[in-house]
Amino acid sequence: MTAKSTRPNIVYFFVDDMGYGDASCLNPDGKIQTPNIDRLAREGMVFTDGHSSSAVCSPSRYSVLTGRYNWRSTLQKGIVGLYGPPLIPTDRLTVPAFLGQHGYHTACIGKWHLGQGWDFELNEKDFHPRSNYGPIPTEPDADQQASPDQQQRWREAFSKSITGGPTQRGFDYYFGVDVPNWPPYCFIENNRTVGIPSEFLPSRLVGNNLASFSGPAMPYWHFEQLLPTWAKKADHYICQRAAADEPFFLYLPMTSPHTPLSVNKPWIGKSGLNNLYADLMLETDDVFGRILASLDKHGVADDTLVIFASDNGCAHYIGVSEDGRGSYEKAMEPQGHHPSGPYRGYKSDVWDGGHRIPCLARWPSVIEPGTECGQLVCLSDLMATCAEIVSDTLPDNAGEDSVSMLPLLCQDGPSGRKNLVHHSISGKFAIRDGRWKLVLCPGSGGWTYNDAEAAKADMPLVQLYDMKDDPGERRNLQAENPDKVRDLLALLRRQVADGRSTPGLPQENDVSVDIWKLDTMPGVAPRIMDDY
């Protein structure tokens, strides 16, 4: 038997900001129909208790590729900023690097957002226009002509090799963008931009759920090209690798249905919800269908483990107000569609709506079609799953928070995962252990219900929920169960101190980890110290 016949190809289709309730197979009462995701559910396994490690983007991507909780890294809250440094250190083992050691060819096609290693000063207005993600130099007029001096600085900057992107973190091949709604507005292949940006992104593409701000762009840049490009590049890669002897790992981090909400013409209005997010969700599902069709066409579908997942929940401004400025009637909830399904909260929140995600898998020779798994799984579990697939053991300093899903995929027994740590955009913690969930803040930990406001309203400083009886997290049981609060708090503290949540030698976190983040709740430190 060849290596290819004994080890599956792995395709990881990773969407951006899709809520649990946006897949019709998970939300029968929803208004968005996702036939290709539903196909995967029929042909494989649906995980109904699957979670991202964080309620926002970069941290979850870190956990997928390292098998480690994001809050053990230097990023304690928020996301990697504009032109930010690489979040994954060079000595950190990644999934593609590990699989490469076992004969896999590896590729990343799509959005990176883990830092590229750009080689220029971040405080220059030519590269870092006004934003809420960093220093605030004067922003150029979005429609102004780039001056000869600016164009020269761009030529100098973007002609250099990128030092910290995917091909420096284990991938053999990369084609994608850093962050689709941030500059530079260009494609990146391996460690170089495809062309040199030479103009500012036009103002018609800035705001209104498109680009966050202007910046260096390629001529005629437009966001509608992104999804078709990912599909074509993926098909080409699958075609190439199907003819090769070694197995492949294809990581497909989509730029959608996250902003920019740029929808190609066949999909505009197709959802019937007067909502571009819903239309973009349909187009995203179609791209996934094209990936499945590519596997079929090139004869590798039966030898491929396909995983579909989202990096976090849907953004609240999509569910409640389409543009974040009050267009409530165009939002999803008023039209009867709940992107978070039955769960509370949205992207950014430590409540389950922020991180309970659609998670499905298909592996024809292993997974029984049409199966459902209610056990706890996390995006960080990919690393350990790959290790068990190739019959290897991870070193102690890799995959510290990764638990193999292979027993669940094979239906051989329960998962080794008994608990899971959740993390919000502001760095607030929660821990789930069996049916119980402890939340270490008085609000959502994110945008839905500001913790400072919740503290001012004298809400309890912690929340305890029975997720079996109350999956919507509406009845706070902390007052009635002080022993359970103490037990879960002790479990969290132990996992922080050990530098890992799985068996193995203790490890160091990259920085000191504060589980309370009191800076987001002014004036409550004495109450925390007195009670906990």
Image (cartoon, helix red, strand yellow):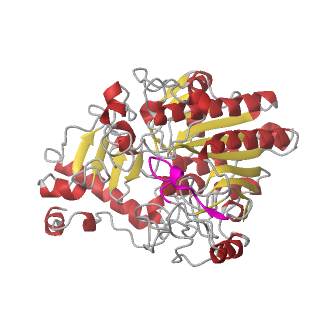
Visible residue check, residue 401:
no
Q: Quadrant of the N terminus?
A: top right
x then y, percent, for residue 190: 74, 60
Viewer-side residue, 393 vs 290: 290
Q: Is residue 70 above or below residue 159?
A: above
Locate residue 470 relative to residue 49 in the image: left or right: left
Please identify the quarter of the rendering in which residue 287 is found.
top right
Q: Residue at x 60, y 35 (%)?
A: 264
Q: Main secondary structure of the magenta part?
A: loop
Q: Residue at x 17, y 50 (%)?
A: 482
Locate residue 4 relative to residue 519 in the image: left or right: right
x then y, percent, for residue 349: 34, 49
Viewer-side residue, 456 vs 216: 216
Q: Is residue 115 above or below residue 253?
A: below
x then y, percent, for residue 174: 72, 55
Visible residue check, residue 179:
yes
Q: Quadrant of the C terminus?
A: bottom left
Locate residue 120 relative to residue 331 in the image: left or right: right
The total number of labels drawn is: 0
Numbered range of the magenta stretch: 198-213
Q: Is residue 379 above or below residue 509?
A: above
Q: Is residue 388 magenta?
A: no
x then y, percent, for residue 182: 54, 58
Q: Is residue 207 magenta?
A: yes
Q: Is residue 451 above or below residue 198?
A: above
Viewer-side residue, 69 vs 221: 221
Viewer-side residue, 293 vs 377: 293
